[in-house]
Amino acid sequence: MAGHSKWANIQHRKGRQDAARSKLFSKLAKEITVAAKLGDPDPDKNPRLRLAVREARANSVPKDVIQRAINKSQGGDAENYEEIRYEGYAPGGVAVIVEALTDNRNRTASSVRSIFSKHGGNLGETGSVAFMFDRKGQIVYPAAAGSADQVMEAAIEAGAEDVESDDENHVIWCEATELAEVSAALEASLGEAETAKLVWKPNITNELDLEGAQKVMKLIAALEDDDDVQSVTANFEVSDEVMAQLAG
């Protein structure tokens, strides 16, 4: 099994601690609306919507906000959001993938390009860094869900392909196309996960010192602050010492 991803842990904590609640709710609601509009408005019949609703619940989005987002998708005045992926490089040659939902492609492209430039990075062409990542399903459970061995056994039985456990979380990986099935099987054995979503998992990483990591995280924070940006993934790793400094 692969080693623990320090960056994934930093990213997970940072998302919980730093994201403004109203902005986070808005982004989660937008994903729910798009998922419901592109598929069935019933989460039981729409895997993407079911995962979006689970992610919203995991972040304490109220039930009425979730339902309004679903209802909005069925209205004639629902915005037509376009899914766009941007790829580029942060300082230090770190590869970055940005996923956005937008109703104005030109506005979003201009904003993302400006953020990269302002923080010492550069926006590349589609496909310029995607080869450094694999599209995977990621399911996260708290450490209290069970021992590493128990979670490993449940993950194997559910059809997952990898587990990374530490003192805080169990991160379970599966094929992107099997996320709904694997998460449902795990829910039957371990209960509801904290999160279950599609992510870009780095297959090549770039280890950074404290200064380099701080520069990259400033760029990521600025991108995450953009209203159209849904997710940001970068392929850097840091040592335990640097991670402690970043977390502190």
Image: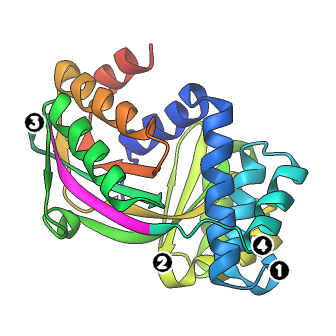
Whole-number angstrom distance, CA of label 3 to CA of label 2: 29 Å
Whole-number angstrom distance, CA of label 4 to CA of label 2: 30 Å
The residue labelled by disc 3 is: 92
Q: Is residue 157 visible?
A: no
Q: Which of marks 3 and 4 is nearer the N terminus?
A: 4
Whole-number angstrom distance, CA of label 1 to CA of label 2: 21 Å
The residue labelled by disc 2 is: 176
Q: Dot 1, how many residues are within 10 Å of its Cα: few (below 14), some (14-19), or many (20+)?
A: few
Q: Which of marks 4 and 1 is in front?
A: 4
Disc 2 is placed on an element classified as: helix
Name the spot of residue 149 as percent of width and height, x first.
62, 59
Q: Which amino acid does label 4 sit on?
A: Gly
Q: Which amino acid does label 1 sit on?
A: Asp
Q: Which numbered disc covers residue 75?
A: 4
Q: Is residue 47 visible?
A: yes
Q: Is residue 37 above or below residue 198?
A: below
Q: What residue type is labelled 2?
A: Ala
